[in-house]
Amino acid sequence: MNKSIKRSDCPVSCSLDIWGDKWSLLIIRDLMDKKQCTYGDFLKAPEGIATNILASRLQALEENKIIEKLVHPDSKAKVLYRLTNKGIDLLPIMLEINLWAEKYFPIPDERKAMLKEAKKDKAGFIKSMSRELKKQVQSTR
Amino acid sequence: MNKSIKRSDCPVSCSLDIWGDKWSLLIIRDLMDKKQCTYGDFLKAPEGIATNILASRLQALEENKIIEKLVHPDSKAKVLYRLTNKGIDLLPIMLEINLWAEKYFPIPDERKAMLKEAKKDKAGFIKSMSRELKKQVQSTR
DNA sequence: TAAATTTGCTTGCAAATTGCAAGTGCAAAT
DNA sequence: ATTTGCACTTGCAATTTGCAAGCAAATTTA
């Protein structure tokens, strides 16, 4: 795992080398939705990621500075994961993926409602959501 | 190959089920850059996709109506691939991927120049590029 | 018109990755 | 002191990937 061989200088290729698989963006989605997640939270996602795959993806994302770990304030036994600024910057991509999917798949109504808001003012939506997520990061440095 | 099991109703998950791997978006990138490609064109890409993987991805993308095949006007031996409207609608995602990568990786100067234009007026850039690609589709129906 | 070449794949097989199930070790609760 | 919860790790079978070679149809060359 974690081969760091860059296939080319293409920005798309470089990006896919980091998060171009069936699971990484789902981990990132969970963190965008819930701000912070424990290992167990990720396992609860409806797609059902296998625990060893989860561990390897979390490690790769951490090595690539997309996410970071911190000890849970309540207990040393728990670990909290959250997005770094680099990870938060994936928000525009995530939004566009949602908008594309909305056009071509039936998606949950609650998501639709959120996307309706987002479409009114994309830049504003990204900015406010980004601020929300960054608040977490700042407050624990 | 080509398992069509939907992992969940999440828009991100549904999208990844179609193009969430290390190669599909590179195929789509080539088609956005060059409008139309032959099988051989894809093999020439710097990332070096294996021929069997290429064949399986092309088939999956076609089944999912992201791309379509047509016979080359010059020769029955050649096949041309191009994006469908559904595939062209991936442009905003592709643009945001490029912009994210530009921020975090060194990328080729020519790409940078193009992105500079795109940033000035994202919606306009998407619209004109989309029109370019759709022209191809319309003219051969 | 026959032979060589190009084009778009397919096939076989080894290597890598994934996915499932069952641990393991540390912290915290009972 | 023992059980429970949490974050992983390990072993192994199944799937997927990647490399190399092959192949049939269409086109070009001789």
Image (cartoon, coloured by chain):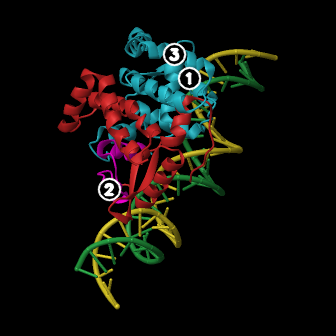
Chain colours: A red, B cyan, C green, D yellow
> Where is residue B19 shown, x and y percent of the image?
43, 36
The answer to whether B60 is drawn above or below residue D28 in the figure is below
The answer to whether C19 is drawn above or below residue A26 in the figure is below
Label 3 vs label 1, nearer the camera:
3
State the residue in front, D19 or A91: A91
- Specify whether disc 3 shares its chain with disc 1: yes
Looking at the rendered image, the quarter that the N terminus of chain A falls into is bottom right
Write down the quadrant of residue A52 in the picture. bottom left
Mark 3 sits on what residue? B116
Chain bearing tag 3 is B
Please indicate whether residue B47 sits to the left or right of residue A30 in the image: right
Please indicate whether residue B82 sits to the left or right of residue B86 in the image: right
Query: Which numbered dot is residue A41?
Result: 2
> Where is residue D20 shown, x and y percent of the image?
71, 44
Chain bearing tag 2 is A
- Specify whether disc 3 shares its chain with disc 2: no
Whether label 3 touches label 2, CB < 8 Å: no
Mark 1 sits on what residue? B38
| Residue plotted at (43% across, 13% down) | B125
State the residue in front, A83 or B84: A83
| Residue plotted at (48% across, 26% down) | B99
Dot 3: within a 10 Å radius of its alpha carbon, few (fewer than 14), some, or many (20 or more) residues?
Answer: few
| Residue plotted at (39% across, 37% down) | B18
The local secondary structure at tag 1 comes to: loop
Q: State whether residue B2 appears in this view.
A: no
A111 falls in the magenta region: no
What's the magenta region?
Answer: A25-47
Whether label 3 touches label 1, CB < 8 Å: no
Label 2 vs label 1, nearer the camera:
2
Residue type (three-letter) at the residue carrying disc 2: Asp
